[in-house]
Image (spheres, grey):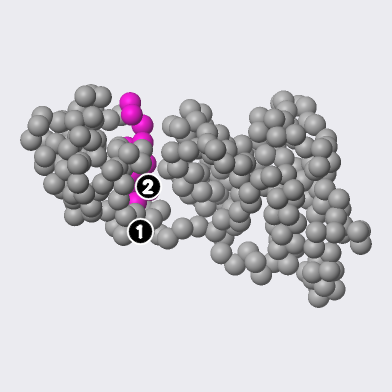
Amino acid sequence: MTVRQVRTIVRTVNECDAFVKVRIGTMESLDSSWRELRNDVVLTAQPWRTVRHFHGQRSLPGWFWSERIGRRLMYESRLELTRLLVAEFNPLLLDVREQTFHLTLRFRDGLVIRHIPDFLFTFDGQPPHLVNVKPPGWEHDAKLRLTFETLASLCAEQGWSYETWTGESLTYIENLRWLAAYRRRSVIPASDEEILTTLDLVSTPMSIGDLEQWARGVGVRNARSVVLHLLWMSVLRTDLSVPLSAKSEVSL
């Protein structure tokens, strides 16, 4: 991008008209100005793009099964997959829309930017949350800065929140990946009664190791799986900013 283009971008922040295309069926799309966009349409939209694979591809797209939503979700990179995992850990998650719409920004000086945001999250009791996933350093791209600053303003108009997500600490993510193996109730080899029995043991904060030992002592099979499932479900809590171990303290 030239110096002249950068100066143009700095000058034209938020001075544009915004138009949206939303896919409402396999072959159908709905065109709208941003200000006429209805939440009930965009919150049920189909992905604008699909998972694509080709020789020499640098990104690693695929599908992520969401246990909370009950369907698979599309991602276009490993970083996007990580953002889905973070959202999946939130017990308030209700829905995710991938590649939600095609946005066209037409600036007063003739500059046109086209953009497809990555995810639109719906959390219980919160406004829709639009997210773009980018690796650290994206802010050095003047065109991206203009796009995301404008999009943040448009979201505020719509009553949404906006985020450009670049990642979390490696320790936090590794902990989530470990706990995610226990997110599906169907693979936890214990009865509902055993899970409730384990939960009843946590009257005060204690270590994971002690809780497992106590649970086994009252007849809970596969106590570790039960404890880790309860942590994933956020029924039990612990500090995920440090590596999980048998010494990690858990509480209600």
- Which is more toward the observer, 197 or 229? 197
Farthest residue to the right: give it: 109
Residues at marks 1 and 2 touching, judged by CB atoms closer than 8 Å: no
Q: Where is residue 50 in the image (x, y as percent from the top left)?
A: 64, 37
Q: Where is residue 41 in the image (x, y as percent from the top left)?
A: 72, 30
Q: Is residue 103 magenta?
A: no
Q: Name the residue under label 2.
A: 177
Marks 1 and 2, the one that precedes in the sequence = 2
Q: Where is residue 30 in the image (x, y as percent from the top left)?
A: 80, 31
Nearest-to-viewer mark from 1 and 2? 1
Q: Identity of the amino acid at label 2?
A: Arg
Label 1 crowd (10 A; few <14 / some 14-19 / many >=20): some
Q: Residue at the location (52% across, 52% down)?
A: 79
Residue 117 in view = yes
Q: Mark 1 points at which residue?
A: 241
Residue 2 location, quadrant: bottom right
Q: Residue at the location (33% across, 29% down)?
A: 185
Q: Main secondary structure of the magenta part?
A: helix
